[in-house]
Image: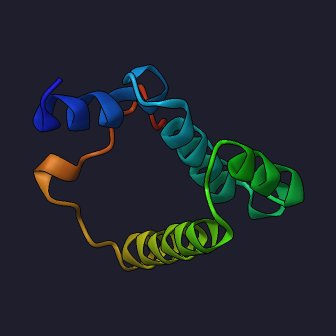
Amino acid sequence: MGDDELARAIRTDYRTAGLDEKTRRLMDFAVALTRDPTSSGAREIEELRKVGWTDAQILTATEVIGFFNYYVRMVEALGVEPEPEMERDPEVWPDP
């Protein structure tokens, strides 16, 4: 699978995009952290460690996920319209 094809598959549904378990688990963590930050705790972090993520990598990922969530909320609050290629796929990410 080429990079563009993989990116499209991930954007459509990362769970069925053929990612390795380590990467998919990190994506699961990102989704959980985004949807409910209080639900992503010690158990989820331990699961990431079990599949090979280091504490430094988990910290970095958590910082990136948190910053991205901050940025998206700020952009949404200000009414900034996304570029056409960044439009949300309602089948994958339905409006709340």
Q: Is residue 71 left or right of residue 57?
A: left
Q: Is residue 6 left or right of residue 3?
A: right
Q: Residue 22's quadrant in the figure?
A: top right
Q: Position of residue 42 (x, y in %)?
A: 87, 59
Relative to residue 46, is residue 24 depicted above or below? above
Q: Position of residue 39 (x, y in %)?
A: 83, 54
State which quarter of the image contains the N terminus.
top left
Q: Position of residue 94 (x, y in %)?
A: 48, 36
Q: Residue at x 32, y 37 (%)?
A: 11
Q: Is residue 63 left or right of residue 47?
A: left
Q: Position of residue 25 (x, y in %)?
A: 60, 40
Q: Residue 58's quadrant in the figure?
A: bottom right
What residue occupies the far right of the structure in this picture?
Answer: 42
Q: Residue at x 68, y 69 (%)?
A: 55
Q: Residue at x 15, y 38 (%)?
A: 3
Relative to residue 49, is residue 62 depicted above or below? below
Closer to us: 93 or 49: 49
State which quarter of the image contains the C terminus.
top right
Colouring scheme, one of rainbow, by chain, secondary structure, one colour: rainbow
